[in-house]
Amino acid sequence: MAHTAQLGTLTDELIAALNLIPQTLHSRRNACRDFALRSLRAHSFTRTNQFEVEDRLNGLEERFYVAGRDALAGALRKRRDALEPHRNQFTPEVLHLLLELADQPVQKAKLTALNALVEPDEVYTSPPLTWRDIAREDGWKQERDIWRFIDYAPGSSDEEELDVESEASLESLTIRSSTDDEHQRTAQELAVKAQGDDVLNQVQDAQSWRCVAATDADARSKKIPITSTQLLREVLFMLAGLETSLFDSACNPITRFQLQSVSWDSYKALVTSFAECGRKLLPLRAAVKREQQSPLLQVFQDCLQKALHSFDLDLSYIQSRLVTIKEDVVISLVGVLEELGPKLAPLYALADIVRQLHEERNPHAFRYLELLFDAVGMAQLQGARATYQLLGTIFFDCFQVYLKPIRLWMEEGKLLPGDRTFFVSESPTRPPLPQIWTSQFNLLRTPEGNLHAPRFLDPAIQRIFTTGKSIVVLKHMKQHESTKKYRASAEPKINFATVCPDHAEFAPFSELFGAAFQAWIQSKHHTAAATLREMLLSSYGLSQSLDALQHLYLMSDGARSDVFASSIFQNLDNLSSSWRDRFTLTELVQEAYSACVDTYRLSAEVASRDLAQQHSAATIRSSVRLGLPAIRLTYRLSWPVQIVIPDEAIQGYQTLFTFQLQTRRALYVLKRPFLNNPHYSGTDMARYCLVRTKLLWFCNTVATYLATLVLAPNAARLREELCWAADVDDMVAAHASFVSRAVAESCQGAKLRPIRECVLDVFDLAIRLEDARRDEWGRRRGQEREVDRLEAIVASPYKRSPLAKGREGVKRRRVVVDEDEEDEVVGLDGEGMGKNARVRDEGKPFAVILRELHGDFERHVRFAVGGLRGVARVSREEAAAKWDLLAEMLEVGIKEL
């Protein structure tokens, strides 16, 4: 009840604070109160997820660091640490409320806003004392000349003598005060009023050498003598990039000055050495002043500025030793030059890099990374430790910026919009899902064909590219989240201290960087590649798809392949149009392979629709070249599997399928049973059996070679390579290599086209042989029928002679013997098989045709053997050994010919 009462009181206060309904409308206020109270009582809201709040705070702190707001990130971390001892159960809710109220903290948050939270240490009862009040009380406001300064540089002409005593000179060396524009005060008045005329005279005497005339009374030029202290001061100013009287803007020494008690040649050599140092630093001084738009160039410019700042501190240290003298000091210009030498050497190397960038025409933004990489390796080889450390540190600081798009690509599969320094580009159009791997993203290349990336990254470019594409594919698979848990803890650091430790100073810098960068890539590449590989093999059935393709196209199951092929050959021999009907073909192939593949993915058709118009049915069945290559099998694969098995690979499968179908066609024709026919002479039958045996041997040899020496070993090798593949690119390469090897070793490549045509000619010889045999049988059978018809006319219808009875008995025996072959002829439009063969062999005796077939077989086999030997001898391809082995297998059949 106490909770209900407290909740009701808080509800009343909430309605009153919102002031939604006037107090005069009591009924509406009560209804609103009851509604809000019921909603609060029955709420089902859970507590804030404290782990999510912690992750969001960590992410916000990391974003501060990435955006370059390190001070703001440090302040956030400091206050989070201070909050830890005071945490309670409501801390996550409060932090979650603050996060929800935050509006673009990276862009809008200001560190100075924290000062409003600091209470002042003491309360001032009176206004603070200011310099303006002091100036008003002491009369400084009316004495404007106190703010004057003296310009010791010569006037408009170096040859004119500057009179520092004159009133005009003092008037020209004054500046206006910020408090009063009406009065002016000279440095002379200030010095005289403060410490007397002696101080002013000392200052003027010390700087008078700048204004001494360079000519004497006779207008002859003379050298203005200077001291070592004056020369050292000017040299240090010149090296610091300041204007001096001894050097011009290009750091060239002015010749009207000379060091006291030193010969002109010695002074010239000394001052020229310092001038050379300054000229080498000029490119760095100019580079830090240019405005840069690219983040890569901005970070390089910042590194140059830091290096120059460190050198300026060294110059200030030398100056401090001469200004605040605590012991006797000897001014040695040569000593200062030697002291600055080790500090100038790294800057010289940087200046050379900047100079090369300036001289090149339209260099890429990452060009200086290549120059830095080469300079670091050269400094290591030369043993310049200071240069090696400075250039190495700058290289890794700049490389961290270049790593940002690489990290985004490898972790999220995204590209920064408008980034022209990254080497990956995205197609403006969205390709189909099976073509994501090959068409959506591309590697940028220069007009010369080089990768648009630093040269030292060339060995890792492909792995970076593959990892990003793997992430994109995993996103389409909805599996991207599974790779995130391995990121932050597994990424190694890449900086100079980690990559190039002191104990590895003798290892080449390129190898140290390559090993470190490969480890960095492996931390991201392995996770994405392994996940995608596992998804393809397990969830999307890559192994099952390969099994199905081998069953269908490579005919790994001979029994099922014979069922499908025999159905097609039977329709061809019967001159039935069913062989080209896609519904019939699909039904035949699905029925034959129903036990080993998913039949709903399988279909078949004849690719050439005008095949019937181009050739007659008898012509198509008489050659393995005409009808069989038009038969196409289609097995629909899932889109992830099509990444590994693209359409180009299916074309290779189809080529192997067609060649095996042609081989089975020849074997089908030769293996049909026949009986010894008394119509043939003994010589014809013997020659026929010889030719048929040799053709059977040839076809079986080719089929055996394909099955045992080409397809089976390559399929086993493909499985092994897929198991060892590191990523999808390796899987794609392994499968493409498998298809190309199988096509080449089966003599289906362009290089072995004459040999392939020769093999197909032998297959056509098998069909021609059977057509000739059936033609001969039909011719002899027709002659016998004509003889029987004439005998029936001559013989008397009322009596039969003994000769007629004897012939009738022979006729009956012949009919019984020829019943099997009679069945083979039925269904061929009354003309029998081998119509095309009769046209080609019309008028030729059967014995002549057999001799021609025998001679053609010998010629084709010898040509195939010789061609295989010659190509295998001159070729360096992997398939050459298989070609030579096939030649040996075929050579066995022609040794006795």
Image: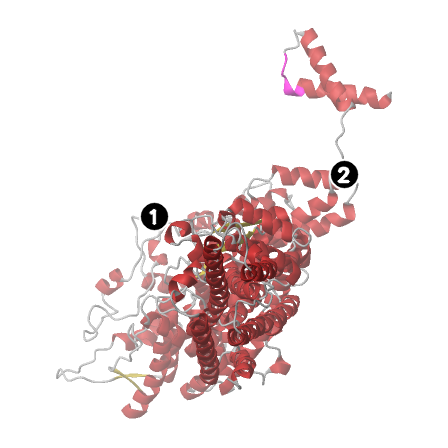
Residue 20 falls inside the magenta stretch: yes
Q: Main secondary structure of the magenta part?
A: loop
The residue pinned by badge 1 equals: 180
The circle drawn on residue 90 is 2
x and y, in percent, of residue 534 in the image: 67, 58
x and y, in percent, of residue 115 in the image: 59, 46
User: Is residue 580 rendered to the left or right of residue 610?
Assistant: right
x and y, in percent, of residue 547 in the image: 64, 59
Against 69, residue 666 (above or below) is below
Secondary element type, mark 1: loop
Is residue 144 in view? yes
Q: Residues within 10 Å of mark 2 (few under 14, many from 20)?
A: few
Instruction: For marks 2 and 1, give the CA distance.
Output: 59 Å
Q: Nearer the viewer, residue 657 or 509?
A: 657
Q: Nearer the viewer, residue 20 or 447?
A: 447
Against 338, residue 248 (above or below) is above
Q: Nearer the viewer, residue 623 or 816?
A: 816
Secondary element type, mark 2: loop
The residue segment tinted magenta is 17-21
Is residue 288 in view? no
